[in-house]
Image: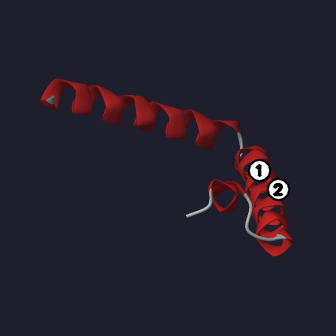
């Protein structure tokens, strides 16, 4: 295997990565703003509770 193929195979793959990455970034930035502050606060609280529970199990 050629090491250059590990990072770059063709321009179509690079373009797809840029498009999908841009779409994901826009989605992750706009969804919490649309859903509101209370929804985001509940989401963060649930994530903290889950991480605390997981920490107690381990």
Label 1 Cα neighbours within 10 Å, binned few <14 / some 14-19 / many ≥20 = few
- Above or below — where is 50 with respect to 56? below
Q: Quadrant of residue 57?
A: top left
Residue 29 position, x and y percent, is 77, 45
Residue 7 position, x and y percent, is 69, 55
Query: Is the residue under label 1 in contact with that under label 2 (CB below 8 Å)?
Result: yes
Give residue 22's mark.
2
Residue that sits furthest to the front in the current view: 2
Q: Quadrant of residue 53?
A: top left
Residue at 29 percent across and 26 percent down: it is 52
Quadrant the N terminus occupies: bottom right
Residue at 52 percent across and 40 percent down: it is 43
Query: Which sits in the foreground, 16 or 1?
Result: 1
Give residue 25's mark.
1
Residue at 63 percent across and 54 percent down: it is 3
Q: Secondary structure at mark 2?
A: helix
């Amino acid at each position: 295997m050629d090491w250059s193929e590990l990072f770059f195979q063709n321009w179509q793959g690079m373009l797809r990565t840029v498009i999908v990455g841009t779409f994901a970034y826009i989605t992750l930035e706009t969804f919490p703003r649309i859903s509101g502050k209370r929804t985001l606060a509940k989401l963060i609280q649930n994530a903290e509770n889950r991480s605390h529970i997981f920490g107690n199990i381990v």
